[in-house]
Amino acid sequence: MNTVTSKDGTRIAYDKVGDGPAVILVAGALGARQSWSGPDLAQRLAPHFTIYNYDRRGRGDSGDTLPYAVAREIEDLEALIDVAGRVAALYGHSSGGSLALEAAAALGHKVTRVAVYEAPYDDAPQARQAWQAYIRQLTELLAAGRRGDAVALFMQYVGTPAAQIAGMRHAPFWRGLEALAPTLAYDHTAILGADPAVPVERVAGITAPALVMAGDASAPFLPITAQTLSQAMPHAQLRILSGQTHNVSSEVLAPVLTEFFA
């Protein structure tokens, strides 16, 4: 494990593997550097690139300086980019993809390329009301210290069956998810915000080449969102991955990223 200090003094932990141009992997909701597909993906990309897989603030071995702000997470990425040689490509999964897009818009030439898989924006009219109800409940649960219930609420929101959630609450890994529960507010309340619609105006300012991906076996709104994102950015391409759900296979994803980042 390596560490770098962000602008506000927060320690950010990361693993580094491979050789070649720098690529930073950005996990989504409830993902820490050792508890998402990042380590597997890093190994598959390592023959071609230097891969940085890190703990976002509030997760794993990284610190968490309050109050939270999206700008601080962008500074975390900038600190990693500077360690990596002052320029790097970004890959973000789900809400990590949303953060990667925000960073690409803010950091300009420091981000050479940006790839995202299923950033969970949703332009459907009915989505806004459901999203805002979720944010209200999440805020109440976290304020009350009910971390397990906050995790369960998120899982329920994304469609996990109630019986499966009940079983997961008794699994050894549940305690780790509870530790990450406050970061649900970082990803959802802050990064995605009160309106889950695609932030067309913000992403239109991204000048780096972009790859926007979704799976054709995911929730129907996600490929639609990917298309909207790709059309909003001046130098973006769209890829729909056959047979893939939101939990995209690293075996399928790695060749696509290798081609794009190369």
Image (spheres, helix red, strand yellow):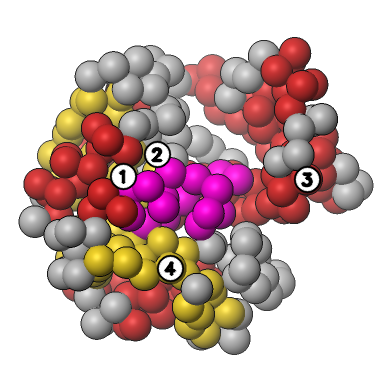
| Along the viewing direction, whichever of 38 and 224 lies nearer the viewer | 38
Q: Residue 107 placed where, x, y %?
A: 31, 71
Residue at 39% over, 39% down: 119
Query: Label 1: how many residues lie within 10 Å, few (<14), some (14-19) or many (20+)?
Result: many
Label 1 vs 3, first from the N-terminus: 1
Query: Label 3: how many residues lie within 10 Å, few (<14), some (14-19) or many (20+)?
Result: some
Asked if residue 160 is positioned above or below residue 33 in the image, the reply reads above
Label 3 vs 2, first from the N-terminus: 2
- Looking at the image, is mark 2 or mark 4 nearer the viewer? 4
Q: Which residue is mark 4?
A: 15
As drawn, is 134 to the left or to the right of 253?
A: right
Is label 4 in contact with label 1 (beta carbons under 8 Å)?
A: no
Segment colored magenta: 25-42
| Along the viewing direction, whichever of 261 and 232 lies nearer the viewer | 261
Residue 119, numbered label: 2
Q: Amino acid at mark 1?
A: Val
Give the Cα distance between marks 4 and 1. 20 Å
Is label 3 in contact with label 4 (beta carbons under 8 Å)?
A: no
Residue 190 colored in magenta in the image: no
Residue 175, numbered label: 3
Q: Which residue is mark 1?
A: 116
Give the Cα distance between marks 1 and 3. 29 Å
Q: Amino acid at mark 4?
A: Asp
Q: Residue 248 placed where, x, y %?
A: 36, 31
Image quadrant where one finds the C terminus: bottom left
